[in-house]
Image (spheres, grey):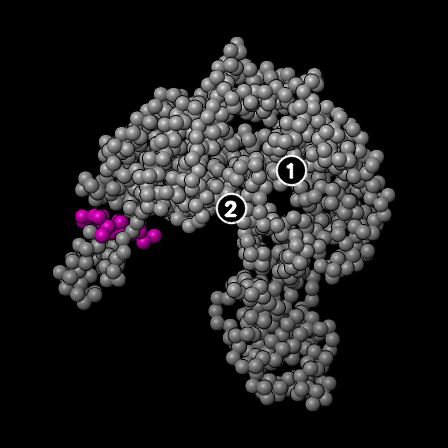
Amino acid sequence: MQGEHEFRAEQAVRRAGFDRDVSSGCAVTGPPGSGTTTVLTSLAGRVEGPTVWVSGVRRSAELVFAHLPAVLAAGETSLAGTRWAVARQLSEDRAGALVVDDAHLLDDDAGAIVHSLAVHDGVPTFVACSVEPGARVPDAIRALWKDGHLPRYELALLGVDEVRAYVEHVVGAPVTSRDVDSLMRWSQGRPSLLVELVASSVADDLWAVINATAVLTARPAPPTTLVEELKSTADVLPEDVYAIVEVFAVAAPVLGGRLLDWLPLAPLIDVAGMDTLVEAERAGVIVVDGARVRLASPFLADAIAGHTPTLRRAAIANRLSTAVTTSALHGSEIGSNDLVQTIAGLLTTDASHGRTLSRTQTTARSALRLGDPTMVRSLISSFYGSDATADIVDPELAVLYGWASTDLNDTSSILTLLARWNNDQSPRWRGFIEFFTAYFTRRETGSATFLRQHDQHPDGLRGAVADWIDRDRLSGVWFGYLVAETAILVGRYSDARSILDAVMPHSGDNGLLVFSLTMIELRLETMTAGADAAAAKAETARSDSAWRSDHVWAAADYTCAVAHVCAGRLDVARTEIRDCAPFVAGPALDGAPTRLMDRIDRMTGVDGPARNAGVAPSVTADPYSAQLGGDTVVDQAWETAVGGRATAAVDALLEFGDLAVDAAPTVVVDLIELAARFVSITDRRRLALLVALAERVEGRVETARRMRAVVDYCRALLAGEGGGVEAAAQTYRRLGLRPVAADAFAQAAALFRADGDSLAAAAATTAAHRLTRDMGGLASPAQTSIAPPDLTRREREIVRLASQALSNQQIADRLHLSVRTVEGHILRASAKFGVQDRRALVAAWEESDR
């Protein structure tokens, strides 16, 4: 396995972007800590023969070169004498090169010696030099690249992809984008600092591997040398600028990175004053971006944190808390009121005088609205000094704890609270209890009965939801989620749309519930508007979230991943799933991210463990059984089909679809579509069963674009009409359902070939290949059937020339072959591609060669 140092060196050399032979020397420049020494060491290792190394120090030339025997023997102190002594040393050693590290630290005399050896003596010279604004570089060194004597390569700071690659190499597992972004921010892209931070995190055992993804559980300690350097910097800051750093030192541990090291600008203006902030920005202490501020060096706060007395920390926290609240009241662009209340509450609840019932209620309520259920429960537990739900005596805190537990799917805590507070008559508690009563009723009686019960409202389902929201908004939105989800499952799309439109404006009471609503909206949008519209909804919900707790990140990423899988953006979905897997791997989604990643692996031909073997899903009154069972059957079908048993996969999909069609016909649409993609185009019995099942579903749901596409697709397959299947593929492509479209195009190609229409077959094959290429590959049976054939070297050569519009005679003349031989190769290549003429052969070859 490649070592850590070798891996870093390889990365650094790639970043340098060497575009020519540098065996005669070069200059590598870059900001401090960018890896210039690493590149220099790598280049020196490629030099034939020994090398002479010197390192810059802010000393005289004779000290820089004093370690060389020839210089010591000469005893020279003059510039000329030192220069000739160094030249003699290079000659005696038969050195292949002079290597100069930290050339920016050389004095003028030493720089002149290096310049003379490189320019006048022609010594191959490799120079590493840190360059930053305001720093002095000896004129003689700068002239090496300025005057064209040595090619200069500027070493940029690390990019996100390089940070990810390095961290994953060291940790030995995929890491989340959030941790990559954090390490990028903390290291500021400097390889030297990144290496120390990662080494510190590994040494302190800060990485936890959850669902095969490594997660950083805490911020690594900054290097001691960096802290000392930053402390020295802080000590000479003006007193009022130092006070700004103290504000960040107090706030950062409390907020825990949830604002990505930023603080809102408006309250800082109140605390420090605009003039001081301007001074701090000019001095490079802070970075201002719109209405937010962060420290330019994230670890500057760490450097002074232990030097602020306890009472002063409390005073700073209170002052900032007051400023946050005041700024919001004055209408500044600080963000939502919930963000204000949460920041203000967190800043004061650490102090004993801040743990009042009112403050805890306000902060917990705001944290729930921001989608941070773990923080809600932590605040309440901290207030009571216990993690036990039995110790909660305030009904407001109890119901907030209950909704947070609902977000976390902590059934035990929910049931304990329901039993203890069952007789409480406060509106919030009645709403919590009535919601779970409705939930259990749906689970026991089924979707149809549940909806009939609420259809009795004079204004129908939307009226029932609206009345509940008027009574208690938070539980009313949860009830709306339950009703909308049920309506989607049974195919009442107009009702579902109406309910979601009524519920969404009130969904801010629970930040995670927003993503639960978005998840069911994805299914609705995919049925009625298409996968691209659904993905846009998911991305909008994510971008609207300002609070970056683990759960908000995870819910947003998982929601987007589901949307991108439907749309065929499989590489994007992989990243989203990897990022969310550690935080939604528990009972809340029952391992859904892992299953979705496995499905993507199957879809793209990546081998993996058979996780679904032996699972026999069933359908009960509870509509979740149809959803979970449908997902399981789809996963099993992919495992079975890519394993070469597509017919068995089709049978399983049809069987479960028949069981679920009454309880959740919308779920069955997914099953029909996948069965249609896997079925043999000559298997008329199963094709007839598919059409029958599709028509049963069509009769149970409202008209929707995707439902119409499914029926047309199945009917065209049964009729064996290549044109009809191709039309269905085009419809799916317009709907953004690229995986379905790709397989339908492949099936259309097969039908066209069977009818002898080689041009139409080639066009459909081309469309399928383009879609699968855009998706990053698709390993379905339909795609396997149109995989490009293997041509011999001579066949490839002749077809390539034919694609350049050369005649058979011209090809024969160029390759010194007979015309008959050329014709034979073209005929054999055409047979392999399943086409019947030269034009179709060229089109098929060009597509397969992309």
The stretch of residues the image draws in magenta is 832-850
Q: Which residue is mark 1?
A: 547
Q: Residue furthest top?
A: 458
Q: Which residue is mark 2?
A: 575
Camera-nearest residue between 203 and 540: 203
Q: Residues within 10 Å of mark 2 (few under 14, many from 20)?
A: some
Q: Is residue 169 above or below residue 712?
A: below
Q: In the picture provided, is 630 more to the left or to the right than 155?
A: left
Q: Can residue 834 be found in the magenta stretch? A: yes
The reply to whether residue 119 is visible in this rendering is no
Mark positioned earlier in the residue sequence (1 or 2): 1
Q: In the picture provided, is 796 more to the left or to the right than 559?
A: left
Q: Residue 378 appears in which quarter of the rendering?
A: top right
Camera-nearest residue between 88 and 166: 166
Q: In the picture provided, is 281 more to the left or to the right than 541?
A: right
Q: Residue furthest left?
A: 820
Do the residues bearing badges 1 and 2 touch, measured as CB atoms within 8 Å?
no
User: Mark 1 against mark 2, which lies toward the viewer?
Assistant: 2
Q: Which mark is residue 825?
A: none
Q: Residues within 10 Å of mark 1 (few under 14, many from 20)?
A: many
The kind of residue tagged 2 is: Thr
* Residue 392 position within the rendered picture, expressed as x and y whole percent measured from the top left: 74, 28
